[in-house]
Amino acid sequence: MKIAIDAMGGDHAPKEAVLGALRAVKEYDDLTILLVGDEKKISEYITPHERIEILHTEEEILATDEPVRAVRRKKQASMVLAAQAVADGQADACISAGNTGALMAAGLFVVGRIKGIERPALAPTLPTLNGDGFVLLDVGANSEARPEHLVQFAIMGSVYAEKVRGLKQPRVGLLNIGTEEKKGTELTKAAYALLQEAPINFVGNVESRDLLNGVADVVVTDGFTGNMVLKTVEGTAMNLFKMIKEAMMSNLKSKLAAAVLKPELMNIKSKMDYSEYGGAGLFGLKAPVIKAHGSSDSNAFFNAIRQTKTMVQHDVAQTITSYMEEKK
């Protein structure tokens, strides 16, 4: 198995991508990594390994670039070449921590969309208090959606939760302002009716306040709402731990208490750490394309590689493709 990584994407490129790749090839004997980027910069951090290859390019897609224009004009950019390696069959999947919009464009234009899937969805796994996590989609690939799009999101999310996360009959919920069937907008009401007939374990409407309690294994919504939820969860977790740290360091007594509680606090922090769950999968494409967080460290890259490897092993894209073909 070979996974292509855009080594120049993200806030800490290429160092953290390289370190994550080195850890991955040590962990998995059947894995080869193709690092795409500036060979000179990559070489500063890499230890020669027979299962790490480098595809040199000095062109990059920047965070400030307009996504579609950048993908079309920067044909030799590291992100585009990583996607092209997948399209050409030189790699089984690709990962990038770079420009999210550009990666979605590269996924659509280069890797290609599964026939029958109208809209791909960006789907991260977010933490829950029990440590199991839940898949949320869409979180930004589509700011608007139709009811049938949410049904496709639910099916793709359910396949992922079953094949990659190992859940039997994953519970699928529709994000709404109340649990009652008739609550919400015209979109959610129409989607609710369609989801009841879909080949999934639909558990009904779920409220945002219950997400971290593990009310569902897969939660579907439109990309605008999903992105708001994603940023709220990330921001709340980050600021909560910041406040706890400030309180624990405020005086000698609290510092002594912090020393005693440190193992428990670190355990809680790890449960709420996005990097432990890998990246956000762009579901609906012909092969796995994973968006790692822009601030990913080597641990986050390693977990994104682990997640991607599992998606390839369980043929998630092919399972979705087969379902869409059977539906005809």
Image (spheres, rainbow, N blue to C red):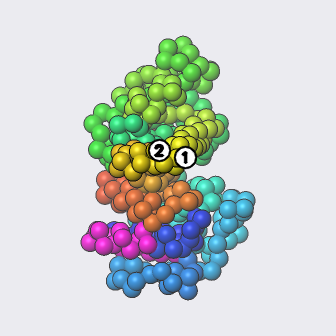
- Judged left or right of residue 220, residue 59 is right
Write the residue at 55% across / 46% down. 250
Residue 143 versus residue 253: which sits nearer the camera?
A: 253
Q: Which mark is residue 254?
A: 2
Which quadrant of the view contains residue 300? bottom left
* Above or below for 205 versus 135: above
Labelled pair 1, 2 in contact (Cβ < 8 Å): yes
Q: Quarter holding the C terminus?
A: top left
Write the residue at 45% across / 34% down. 212
SS state under label 2 = helix
Residue 264 versus residue 260: which sits nearer the camera?
A: 260
**Residue 303 in view, yes or no:** yes
SS state under label 1 = loop
Q: Quarter holding the N terminus?
A: bottom left
Percent position of residue 147, x then y: 56, 29
Residue type of the residue flagged with mark 1: Ser
Residue type of the residue flagged with mark 2: Ser
- Judged left or right of residue 74, residue 25 is left
- Judged left or right of residue 30, residue 15 is right
Write the residue at 44% across / 81% down. 46
* Residue 23 part of the magenta-drawn span: yes
Q: Where is mark 1, residue-wise? A: 250
Q: Residues within 10 Å of mark 1 (few under 14, many from 20)?
A: few
- Judged left or right of residue 296, residue 320 is left
* Residue 135 part of the magenta-drawn span: no
Residue 244 versus residue 208: which sits nearer the camera?
A: 244
* Above or below for 76 versus 300: below
Residue 57 versus residue 316: which sits nearer the camera?
A: 57
Q: Which residues are magenta?
A: 19-36
Write the residue at 46% across / 74% down. 18
Percent position of residue 65, x then y: 72, 63
Which quadrant of the view contains residue 199? top left
